[in-house]
Amino acid sequence: MAREQWDNRTAFILAAIGSAIGLGNIWRFPFVCYQNGGGAFLIAYIVALLTTGIPLLIIEFGLGHKMEGASPLAFSKINKKLEWFGWIPVLIGFMIVTYYSVIMAYCTKYGIASITQAYAQNPSDFFFKETLGITSGPFKFGGFTKQFIWLTIALLVSWVWIVFSVWKGAKTVSKVVYFTVFIPWLLLIVFVVRGMTLPGAMDGLTYYLAPTFSKLLDPQVWLAAYTQIFFSLSVGFGVMIAYSSFLPRKTDLINNAFIIGFADALTAFVGGLAVFGALGYHAHSLGTTVDKLGDIAGPGLAFVTYPSIISNLPFAPLFGVLFFLMLLTLAIDSAFSIVEGLTASIIDKWKVSHFKANLTVSSTAFIIGLVFCTGAGLYWLDILDHFMNYLALGVSVLCCCIFVGWGYGADKIKEYANSISEFGVGKWWEISIKYFTPILLVILIGSEFIRRAKGSYENYGRLPESLGGWLIIILIVIAGYFLYKSKGKD
Ligand code: PHE
């Protein structure tokens, strides 16, 4: 069976950019940035991009392209036993897409609610009560409420959309990404212009951009910058390995990695302009200052703060619909890239049809996602998100550095990537993969272990944390082993 291929180089670049650019750029980046020293964080972020982000993109591109396989197959070509570790990133991605698609469901609900401005009265109640029907704790699921049914339908819509976007794999994705990359960018420009011309916008922008240089001495700022880079570039989830395996033999890897890395960072930066302009306006209309806006972080930013800002604008319904359409189109190509990473892995091993693999992955993810549609859903979503991004992802990237960088040889990947690229990378790249990134990851993982030893995440308690965090990590490792051991088709 001939390997599927992208239509052309642009299609690949857009697909990879589409995967990288997502909700992480528009809500996570801005608040992490402002909590960590504004302009100073931007400096740390660019350093993180150059010292580990782009090097990791290059290793994933090199591996996928050279081995002509998605993550499990690529790892198994280094050494049969390593296939086990190849499954882990795609399974982490799978867990992420189970709730990422639920956030898309919120967007659908909000897009529709924008038409009547249903959230205008009380944005916070609209989110927590009307949309989520949130209960008092993780074990109170709340039963078949109207909120549950609503979110389930919206989740189904997310999945139908995802399934069709990857219908015939790279062939379909090649076409779809023109829409899912350019539409959100156009809308983003609309929001930047709108955000920056609102009264008070300048205060918001000053808050966002003015560097507090002393913050660069705070290790926490650097940790935040590095964690944000991994999630934002979609490295460590097997997505980029699968995507590069669909490239033709004659191609470019290194230049592509730089283009994708910078496009992602630029989008985050520009997204921040829109968000902070609007926050400045928000503070202005409340008669306060941006630093006193309180809890704008986390899910609140997109689903409480922003709706309340939108409802105060002229043409609120229009801006509301456009804003949530932007979030949806930003999220969709990230979501389907994860699905494609796992689907391609399954096809590599069992040679099943794309249709079958896609449907199995998507329907399983939909069923798991139902948990997040319940009244306790947000608690579980929050726990899972934290454990996947702060621990599982770190371990997955560390495995890549050790097994590929040390085991297989960073020098071999480097030579390979250099030989087919417009320009090559030097010794610095090997140093990043073999020393710098792994040491950094050990620090990241270690500091997370220390924090968890001190107390449960967000004080949810040990039991929810064990079930929604630790147990899932253990299950991923076990599932990886079984997938590796099960007999494939040659
Ligand atoms: N990079 C995406 C974002 O910024 C999220 C994502 C994670 C996509 C993992 C693919 C894989 O939102």
Image (tube, rainbow, N blue to C red):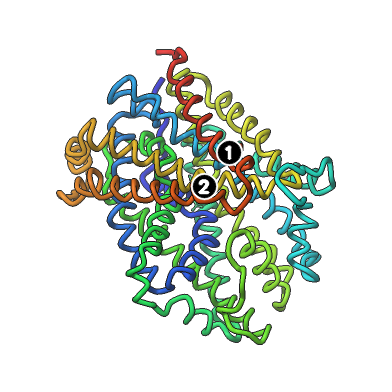
Residue 434, image x, y percentages: 23, 43
Tag 1–tag 2 contact (CB < 8 Å): no
Along the horizontal axis of the image, is 35 left or right of 372? left
Total numbered badges shown on the rendered structure:
2
Residue matched to label 2:
334
The outermost residue toward the front is 454
**Which picture quadrant has residue 288?**
bottom right
**Which picture quadrant has residue 324?**
bottom right
Residue matched to label 1:
466
Q: Depth check: 109 or 368 in front?
A: 368
Mark 1 vs mark 2: give the one in front.
1
Say what secondary structure mark 2 lies in.
helix
Kind of residue at disc 1: Ser
Q: Residue at x 75, y 44 (%)?
A: 374
Residue 221, image x, y percentages: 39, 64
* Quarter that holds the N terminus: top left
Measured in 3D between alpha carbons, the distance from the residue under mark 1 to the one under mark 2, in whole angstroms, is 27 Å
Q: In the image, is residue 276 above or below residue 255?
A: below
User: Ligand 1: does it lie within 8 Å of the C-beta at label 2?
Assistant: yes
Q: In the image, is residue 101 above or below residue 363?
A: below
Along the horizontal axis of the image, is 289 left or right of 484? right
Q: In the image, is residue 123 above or below residue 91?
A: below
Residue 92, image x, y percentages: 49, 37
Kind of residue at disc 2: Ser
The answer, for residue 14, to whether it is visible in the render is no
**Which picture quadrant has residue 63?**
top left
Say what secondary structure mark 1 lies in.
helix
Residue 336, image x, y percentages: 54, 41
The answer, for residue 188, to whether it is visible in the render is yes
Q: Residue at x 51, y 25 (%)?
A: 479
Q: Please tell me the numbered disc located at residue 307.
A: none
Q: Earlier in the sequence, mark 1 or mark 2?
A: 2
